[in-house]
Image (cartoon, rainbow, N blue to C red):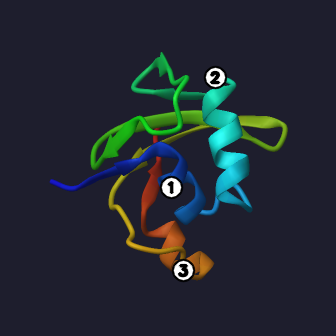
Amino acid sequence: MSATRIDKWLFHARFYRTRTAAQAAAAAGKVRLNGVKVEKPGHAVKCGDVLTLAAGPAVVAVRVLAVAEKRGPATQARALYEIAE
């Protein structure tokens, strides 16, 4: 099972336009990992984890399905997660 930094995953999954913005969101506590507030952008994320974050005016919970090596097109990014119910 592979893992990656939370800021890299958020950037690769296209929740943030830049990795710097993803780092800032994680450092500011705007992301929750399995219900626990994340305060470090280097926190590890692995398949099966549930992330809760703001997506525009709404709050969305997503389940991590895969980890990417690099940022790809939106169709590839969408395969990295599913919306958690």
As drawn, 72 above or below 65: below
Which one is earlier in the sequence, the residue at label 3 or at label 2?
Answer: 2
Amino acid type, mark 2: Gly
Please give the name of the residue rendered at 50% of the width and 55% of the height, measured from the top-left corner.
8
Disc 3 + disc 2, Cβ < 8 Å: no
- Would you name the residue on which mark 3 appears? 72
Image mark for residue 8: 1
Q: Would you say 50 lies left or right of 11 here?
A: left
| Circle 1 crowding by C-alpha within 10 Å: few under 14, some 14–19, many from 20 | many
| Circle 2 crowding by C-alpha within 10 Å: few under 14, some 14–19, many from 20 | some
- Would you name the residue on which mark 2 appears? 29
In x, y percent, where is residue 57?
A: 84, 37
Please give the name of the residue rendered at 40% of the width and 45% of the height, measured from the top-left corner.
63
Which one is earlier in the sequence, the residue at label 1 or at label 2?
Answer: 1
Comparing marks 1 and 3, which lies closer to the viewer? 1
Q: Residue furthest left?
A: 1
Q: In whole angstroms, how far apart are the C-alphas of marks 1 and 3? A: 12 Å
Q: Residue furthest right?
A: 57
Which one is earlier in the sequence, the residue at label 1 or at label 3?
Answer: 1
Between 85 and 54, the residue placed more toward the observer is 54
